[in-house]
Image: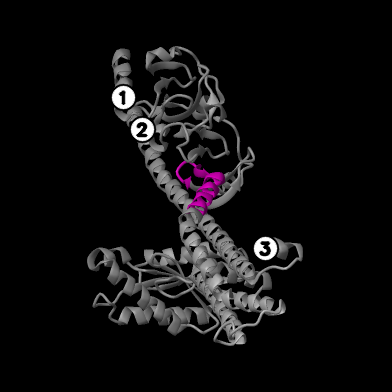
Amino acid sequence: MRWVRNLRTKRIRLVYLIIGLVIASMLGTTCIQTAVGFRSDLQSLSRTTLSLNMESAAKMSATMDSLITSMNANLKTTAESLSQQPQEPQQVLEYLDLMRASGGYFNSMFLTDPEGVVTHISPLSVGIMGQRLTTEAVQDSLSLRRPYISKPYRAVTGRMIVLMTYPLFDASGTYAGMVGGSIYLQEFNVLNSILGISSANASGSYAYVVDYAGNLIYHPAPGRLGQNVNANKVVQQLLQGLGGSSDVINTQGHRFLAGYSPVPKVGWGIVVQSPYEGVYEAALQTALRQILYSLPFWLLFLLGAILIARMLTVPFTVLSEAAEHISKGHPVSGPPFHSHWNYEANQLNNTIMLAMQGLQDQAEEYAAQAKTDPLTGLTNRRTMDSYTGLWVKERRPFGMMALDIDRFKSVNDTYGHQTGDEVLKMLASRMIAATEPTDICCRYGGEEFIILLPDTSLEEVYRRAESIRSSMATSASPTGKPVTVSIGIAGYPSDSTNIQELFQFADRALYQAKQSGRNRVVIHAR
C-alpha cells in the first residue's frame, strides 16, 4: 500500500500533514479555552462563595446581636419581677417555667442566693436544687453583680454550657443573688434555631461560633465544643472585632472559603465557610461539560477539514501520478490538470493561512472577552487584579475610586433591566470621559465600578470623582431624569500597601458616602 511505502521511506503525504495540523490546532485551541475557562470559573466561584459566606455571616451576626439583647431583656424582666415583691416558692417556680417556655432562649433558668446556692430552678429535672454552685462562671457573676455572659464550661451536671446572668436586688436595694439562664451547647438550643441544624449541608458548608476568647460555642461537630481555635487567622480577625472574608487553612489543616462577622454586644464571632474542594470540583465539572458539549461540533469540523484537505491535495496527487506515469515511459495526451500546479500550491497555502488566521482571531477574541465586560466595554475584575498586582510589585502609587449607582435596584424595578443596562453604559462613558488613557476603568460587579489612577494624587482623584458625580447628577439618564452615584476613595500606598485592605478602605468610604446621604464623594479617613 502507498501509505505503507511512504511510512517506510519516512515520507508523509501532504493530506496527513494538513489533517494533523488541523487536529493540533483544534486540540491546542480547546486546551487553551478549557484552561482559561476553568481558571475563570474557579476564580469567579471562589469570589462568589466568599461574598455569599460573608453576607450570611453578617446576617447571622445581626440576628445573634438581637438575640443576645432579647435574652438579656428576658433575664432582666425576670429579675425585676421577682424583686418587686416576695412570692411563694411554687409561684416562683411557675414564673421561671413561664419565662423559660415563653422566651425559648434557655434550656434552664435558676435563682441563687448571694452565696450561689440554687433556690429555684426550671426545670426541676436538672437536679441541682439546694446545691451551692462553685464554678468559676457562677462565682465571677456573683462577685461582679452585673449582667454577665460566661465562656463555655463544664457545669456540675456534666453538661457543656454557656451561662447568662442578671443580678437580683430586693426592695431595699440589697444584693439578693442572681437569676441565670443556661444554654446547653451539646443539646438542641437557641443557637441551633439561628444557625440551622447541627450538621454541614450537602456542599460541606457550615457555620460555627466562637466566644470572646476563641472558644467554640457552636459547631456542627459537638465533640469540638469548648475547643480553643484562636490559632485560626479568621478567628484572630474576629477577636479584633473585624469582619470580612478569607481563603483560610483551618486549625485541622483543611482549606476553606470563609466569611466572618463579629457579634459586637458580646464579643462573639460567627464564621460561615465552604470547603475549597467543593468549589474546585464545581469548576472542574463545568469545564468537563463544556468539552462534552463542544465535542460533536469539533467532530463535524474535523470531518469537514479532512474533506477539504483531500480536495486541496488532489492537484498534487494528480501531478505525482502523472510524473510516475511519465517516468515509466508512458506518453500522456495532455497536462494532468488545466491549472498550473504552482497556482494550486499557492491556493493551498492561502487557505491554510486563512484558516490559521481565523483560529488566531478566534483566540484573540476569546482573550479580549476574558478581559472585558461585555455590557460596558470596560475591563473586568481579572484585568483589574493584574494591574493592581503589577503596580504593587513595581511599588507604583495609584488612587482607587469605588463607585456605586444610588438606588440602582429601583431603576431596574421601575424602568426595567434594559434601561438599567443603559444607565450602566452611561456611567461607563462618563468614567472614561473623566479619566486619562492610562487610567483603568473597571466594572467590578452589578452596579459597582472601580477606577485605578496611577501616579495620581488623592486631590486629583477627588477632583475627577467630583467630575463624574456632578456629570451624573446634572444629566438626564436613560430613565429621563438624573441618576446619582456615590464614590469612595483610597490611595496606595498612602492608605495601605495591602490590596485587599485598600479595597476595604475604598468600600468603607463608599459606604460612608451612602450613609451620609448618597450623591457624594468621600475620601477614606486615615
Report the disc number at residue 3.
3
- Frontmost of labels 3 and 1 is 3
Residue at x 37%, y 17% (from the top left corner) = 123
Residue position for label 2: 76
The first of marks 1 and 2 along the sequence is: 2
Residue position for label 1: 101
Residue 38 placement (x, y as % from top left):
54, 57
Q: Give me the C-alpha separation between circle 2 and circle 3.
A: 95 Å
Image: 252 above or below 174: below
Q: Nearer the viewer, residue 288 or 14?
A: 14
Q: Nearer the viewer, residue 357 or 216?
A: 357
Residue 289 placement (x, y as % from top left):
48, 52
Does 64 lie within the magenta span? no
Residue at x 38%, y 65% (from the top left corner) = 514
Image: 381 above or below 197: below
Say what amino acid the circle numbered 1 marks. Answer: Ala
Q: Is residue 86 left or right of residue 361?
A: left
> Are the residues at dot 3 and dot 1 in contact (C-beta closer than 8 Å)?
no
Region in magenta: 262-289
Callout 3: helix, strand or loop?
helix
Report which quarter residue 194 is drawn in. top left
- Frontmost of labels 1 and 2 is 1
Residue count near mark 1 (Cα–Cα under 10 Å), binned few <14, some 14–19, many ≥20:
some
Say what amino acid the circle numbered 3 marks. Answer: Trp
